[in-house]
Amino acid sequence: MRIAVIGAGSVGRHLATALARAGHDVVVGVRDPDDPRHADLARRATPADAVAGAEVVALAVPAAAVADALAGLTLRPPAVVVDATNAVGAPPPGGFATMGALTRSLVPDDVPVVKAFNTIGAEHLVAPVVDAMPAFLPVAGDRAGVDVVVPIARSLGFDAVDLGGPDAVPLVEDHARMWIHLMRNGWGRGFAFAVVGAPAGDDR
């Protein structure tokens, strides 16, 4: 698929690398594509140019930058927006209950929004198998988007699980908070959650 990753921080860079390795056509959207700091990015463009023609737009910017990042983008169906952001150390901006709700409010109603790729350390995006087990990756959001994003996540090597619709987005963000809490309290960054035993009716 043609995928635009908006943001060239740790999450954006690792996600773009993982997607490209899996065979997707990836371009990273950055404010200044000519900035020497971005010379290592194989494909880069301004955010507006990056999303042109993209089937999936992955948002990988700090929480405080979400509104500005989306304000400059023209998003239309059939594009799907993937929110990979987290509010770390502060509530989501604008009084929203979740980052997913903030992102949903800033994206046209006819463009699906999905929460994913925010629940694990950025480095695991390119190495999602830990101790010989694929890392668990929860996905939630608008149905049309979840049906696109779950196969993408599985193409990267994750045990991606469809948690449901927009009402399940808080569960994804809670999962991220738990990973961050454990990482900061002695666990380090080298761990992931995994599903042990196949749930009833599981078709993976």
Image (cartoon, helix red, strand yellow):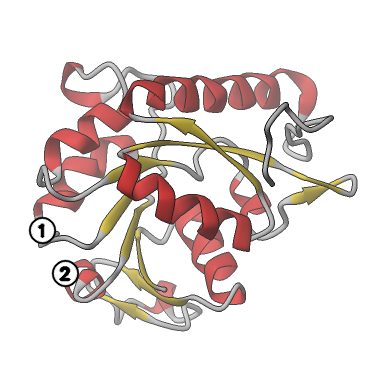
What residue is drawn where x is 22% and y is 73%? Answer: 46
Q: Are marks 1 and 2 in contact (CB under 8 Å)?
A: yes
Check the picture and name the quadrant holding the N terminus.
bottom left
Residue identifier under label 1: 72
Q: Quadrant of residue 148?
A: bottom left
User: Mark 2: few, some, or many residues within 10 Å (few <14, many ≥20)?
Assistant: some
Residue identifier under label 2: 48
What residue is drawn where x is 60% and y is 26%? Answer: 180
Q: CA distance from mark 1 to mark 2?
A: 6 Å
**Nearest the camera: 46 or 200?**
200
**Count of numbered circles on the image:** 2
Q: Quadrant of residue 199?
A: top right
Question: Looking at the image, is 15 positioned above or below residue 165?
Answer: below
What residue is drawn where x is 42% and y is 44%? Answer: 84
- In the image, residue 121 lies at what x, y percent? 62, 42
Question: Looking at the image, is 9 positioned above or below residue 22?
Answer: above
On residue 127, the disc is none
Give the farthest residue toward the right: 131
Q: Quadrant of residue 164?
A: top left
Tell whether 128 sits left or right of 197: left
User: Mark 1: few, some, or many residues within 10 Å (few <14, many ≥20)?
Assistant: few
Ranked by sequence position, the earlier of labels 1 and 2 is 2
- In the image, residue 6 lies at what x, y percent? 32, 60
Tell whether 67 sits left or right of 130: left
Helix, strand or loop under label 1: loop
Tell whether 130 sits left or right of 1: right
Give, as a three-letter code, the residue at label 1. Gly
What residue is drawn where x is 40% and y is 20%? Answer: 170
Give, as a three-letter code, the residue at label 2. Ala
